[in-house]
Amino acid sequence: MEEYRRRPALAYEKHILPRVFLEGDLVLKSVDAVMRKMYLPKWTPKWEGPYIGSEVHPNEHCILLDLDHGTTIGPINFKYVKQYYA
C-alpha cells in the first residue's frame, strides 16, 4: 500500500521545481487582489515591485523591503513572489 501511494507522489514531484530566493534578491510581489482571488479587470497589472528580499525563511516565506519607501512588507509566501530580472 505504501508503494502504491509513493509512486504518484514521485511522478508529481519530478515536475515541480523548488523556488529558491536569497537575501538581497530583487523580486516582484503579486497584487493583493490576486492573493485574495478577487476579480481584476482585464488589463490591470498582476505584479508590483520590485522589492528586495530582506529576510528569507526556510519554510518558504519571506519579508520584503520596499525600495521607494524603506518599509517592510510581509511575511509573504513564495508562491506569491517571483524573481525580478533587471
Image (tube, grey):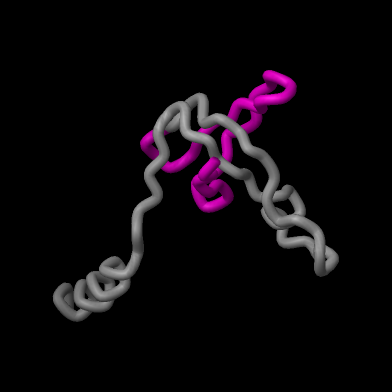
In this rendering, the answer to whether 81 lies above or below 4 is above
Q: Nearer the viewer, residue 77 or 83?
A: 83
Point out residue 56 in the picture as x, y percentages from the top left corner: 44, 31
In this rendering, the answer to whether 70 lies above or below 63 is above
Point out residue 18 in the picture as x, y percentages from the top left corner: 35, 53
**What residue do we see at 74% from left, 21% from top?**
69
Furthest-front residue in this view: 86
Q: Confirm whether the magenta stretch covers residue 61.
A: yes
32 lies left or right of 84: right
Furthest-top residue in this view: 70
Point out residue 22 in the picture as x, y percentages from the top left corner: 40, 33
Q: Which residues are magenta?
A: 57-86
15 lies left or right of 28: left
Q: Nearer the viewer, residue 9 or 41?
A: 41
Q: Confirm whether the magenta stretch covers residue 48.
A: no
In this rendering, the answer to whether 32 lies above or below 55 is below
In this rendering, the answer to whether 43 lies above or below 26 is below
